[in-house]
Amino acid sequence: MKDIKGACKRYDHYMMYGIPAFTDKEEIIAWLQQYPSLVPEDYGQKLERLKHMKNKRYKTVPGDIFRVEMDLFTDGYVRFVH
């Protein structure tokens, strides 16, 4: 697989989501075939929960802290400052 760091505007998205730069169709097929083994075992349950979750709106105040999903394996926390 080729290095796309200099050629891609959103290189950080490729790295954040673990998507490599492909050079041919066979690489794409091979990656897609092994991808299910990379996701967490409870990811199906997480998707089901998200599918049926109601959208909520929150009134935020400076200092509020939220958990956000960074990728499939990592959650992060952000603090609302403005």
Image: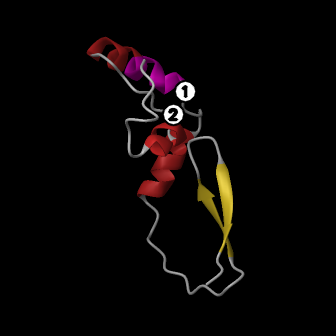
What residue is pinned by disc 2?
A: 18
Name which quarter of the figure residue 31 lies in: top left
Residue appearing at x 31%, y 12% in the figure: 26
Name which quarter of the figure residue 55 lies in: bottom left
Expressed as whole percent of the image width and height from the top left, the position of residue 36 reads 47, 26
Look at label 1 and name its amino acid. Leu
* Residues marked 2 and 1 touching at CB (< 8 Å): yes
Rendered-image quadrant of the N terminus: top left
Look at label 2 and name its amino acid. Gly
Residue appearing at x 38%, y 22% in the figure: 32
Relative to residue 75, is residue 51 drawn left or right? left
What residue is pinned by disc 1?
A: 38
Question: Which secondary structure, mark 2?
Answer: loop
Q: CA distance from mark 2 to mark 1?
A: 10 Å
Expressed as whole percent of the image width and height from the top left, the position of residue 49 reads 50, 54
Q: Where is 40 relative to 13, above or below?
A: above
User: Is 36 colored magenta in this rendering?
Assistant: yes
Question: Which secondary structure, mark 1?
Answer: loop
Rendered-image quadrant of the C terminus: bottom right
| Range of residues picked out in magenta | 31-37
